[in-house]
Image (cartoon, helix red, strand yellow):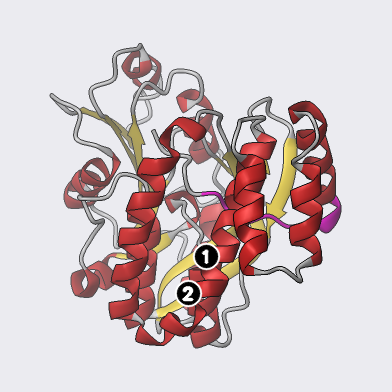
Amino acid sequence: MDKSLLISVIIPCYNGRAFIGEAIESVLAQTHTDWELIVIDDASTDDSKDIVKKFCADKRIRLLKNKKNLGIAKTKNKGIKISKGEILAFLDQDDIWQSDKLSLQLARLEQDAAAGVVCCAMTFTDPSGNETTVFKGFDDKDQRELIKELYITPVNSSSVMMIRRTSLGRTGVFNESLRGWDDYELLMRLGAEFRICYERRPLVKKRIHRGGAQRLPEVLAEEDRVFEGLLKVHPFLSEFKGERDARRFFDRSIELALSKEKGAHGFAGSSLALRPLSITGWALYLITMLPASFAAATVRTILSLAGKAKLVSNTRR
């Protein structure tokens, strides 16, 4: 591994006072030390900027401020434009990296010249900070199968991604018309041009927050638009649309159950209607009939025992 290779790390920040310090500390703890960190405050109304400023004594860290709120995709693209590294990594303000995240992913990129992006497994925590499950990622040997798996079970976090800058020269950057699916949509575009690699160790700790139910109609509408666009990039995926919809509703039900929000039972029913012989579908349908606290605890226990999770989509502001 080239220890002198500069990696540009970009953190978009909006009202992130509760977690931004911890995110930055996880970058400072990286075993690969040749990086620059660009934190872009997207017109926060809290004291996020003051927290970030305390870290700027380290000359590798820069704080930039948007005059008005641009949204997460535009903010990340701004970071890409001003960054210097040939390798790009992104970290959401409320996520945490393991200390060897950059070094392990960089090693994978160096081992595979055809790879345009490398992702990794991640650990999830619930709103209380309890670790719930681990998303183990996908086998990257068969790229067609990998694209299919990403379509059925979409991973939607730029915190797991490390990208070659040259790759973006062919695919373009984040789609600024999207609010919550920009990272996943870019990943799938990259997958049409380059290999996607996975580091199967969980190198990211991902927080799942409450508040998703209020935004579900908006999230689902955007999701539909993204997935329709993917069929143009990867036409073979059209035969898996039914399976994808069943998985989509299943994951929504799990998400809402873990957050103790309304709607979990309805989404479980929608998933079951598409896969009426699914044992796990029936189990979730029955579990979500329980009181919210019992349902959340049961789902958390089952997922922990299973040792895997699927990244939910609406963890965006």
Q: Residue at x 42, y 23 (%)?
A: 16
Q: Which residue is mark 1?
A: 245
Q: Residue at x 73, y 38 (%)?
A: 131
Tell me the quarter of the picture where residue 233 sits.
bottom left
Q: Can you say which quadrant of the picture contains the C terminus?
A: top left
Amino acid beneath label 2: Lys
Q: Magenta region's main secondary structure?
A: loop
Amino acid carrying label 1: it is Asp
Q: Residue at x 60, y 32 (%)?
A: 262
Question: Which segment is the magenta one?
Answer: 305-312
Cβ atoms under marks 1 and 2 closer than 8 Å: yes
Q: CA distance from mark 1 to mark 2?
A: 6 Å
Mark 1 residue crowding within 10 angstroms, few (<14) / some (14–19) / many (20+): some
Q: Which residue, given by chain and number where applicable, does mark 2 sit on?
A: 241
Can residue 104 be seen in this snapshot? no
Q: Nearer the viewer, residue 308 or 66?
A: 308
The location of residue 208, given as percent across then percent down, is 58, 37
265 in magenta: no
Secondary element type, mark 2 = helix
Q: Is residue 38 above or below residue 115?
A: above
Rendered image quadrant of residue 183: bottom left
